[in-house]
Amino acid sequence: MSSDLHDDDTETMEACDVPATPAREVPDIPFGVTRGMSNEDYHGDRSAVSSTQLKRMLISPAHFLSGITDPEESTEALLFGSVLHGRLLEPDTFESRFFAMPKVNRARKEGKQRYAECMVQAAGRTVYPEAWKEPIERIIDNAMTHRKARELLAKGEAEVALVWLDPDTGIKCKIKIDWWHDARTLADVKSAEDVTFEGFRRSCARLGYALSAAMYCEGVYQLTGEEPEWAFIACEKGRPNTVAVYRAMRPFLERGRSDFRRALHRLAECRARGHFPMLQAEGEWEDIDLPRWA
């Protein structure tokens, strides 16, 4: 991440843990369209599978199972993305959900006291480094000066959850759309180090964005009958915090749909067998060579 977002905030990042709260039961997400669902309820649901889980299935069934049973670790990148989403897509409720933590030296007595005072002020809100406020505000400004980003965000609603039963495999699927412009246009906000055409295209390939896009479009089609367009609003983490908008082409979505179907069928087979094998399921070795670029 850019030095913009570090600024020696290691201590602050380590200090951004909200006090633990007792585990609570999370009800199954109902079929159909749900608005206003919290991230805790969405991610806590275990009755349906998400695109993140299905991407793990393409690594191996064991990776999928681990992702179900082991909670995902919070990272700086995930926290930054969450703060950006909140500020860009849900500005009216941002201050009630997030708290900017000033940099404090907790090795000193006054720093510990200041930190304790800030945590009282946070009152259970998600805490993030105050140094992030400036780059995030630049991203917001740049999004508003980008014609297509501005048009997409001018109307719509954030964080819409959809749940449906896949007609082919009978697997319950769930998605939570960043920005539902309308049933014909969906947008996903991504923070990235490199939002140039080639740089972001590499991220799409490396992080499995095509599967996610195809699954989200499939969910909208199953529940509305519409076949939407898919757009990425790519936000640069470092200066100048530029914003680029990319529309997924048909081959992009077709590749994603192929990966999505393959993951679903693999999951259905594993569930039927009651067996989730590791990478080399047969226990055989594989021949390996250096990649072409080496």
Image: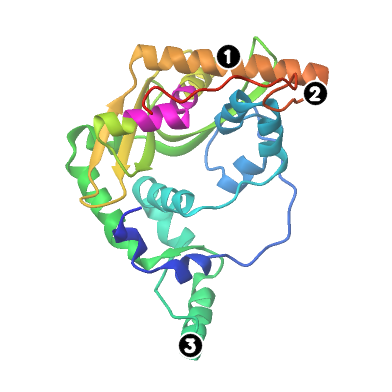
Residue 47 coordinates in the image, percent (x, y): 71, 32
In x, y percent, where is residue 75?
51, 52
The picture places residue 149, in percent across and down from the top left corner, at 25, 36
Place residue 255 in its image quadrant. Answer: top left
Q: Residue furthest top?
A: 168
Magenta-colored segment: predominant secondary structure:
helix
Name which residue lies at 73% across and 53% down. Answer: 24
Magenta region includes residue 207:
yes
Is residue 238 shown in magenta?
Answer: no
Q: In front of the other: label 3 or label 1?
A: 3
Q: Which residues are magenta?
A: 201-213
Answer yes or no: do the residues labelled 3 and 1 have beta carbons within 8 Å? no
Q: Name the residue rendered at 44%, 23% in the picture.
A: 210
Three-letter amino acid code at the position of disc 1: Arg
Between label 2 and label 1, give the one nearer the viewer.
2
Farthest-out residue, right: 274
Q: Which residue is identified by label 3?
A: 108
Q: Determine the secondary structure under disc 3.
A: loop
- The type of residue carrying mark 3 is Arg
**Left or right position of 165 against 194:** right
Q: Residue at the location (30% across, 43% down)?
A: 235
Please give the residue where the numbered disc 1 appears in the rendered image. 261
Real-space Cα distance between discs 2 and 1?
19 Å
Residue 275: mark in rendering: 2
Measured Cα–Cα span from mark 3 to mark 2: 53 Å
Sequence-first tag of 3 and 2 = 3
Q: Amino acid at mark 2?
A: His
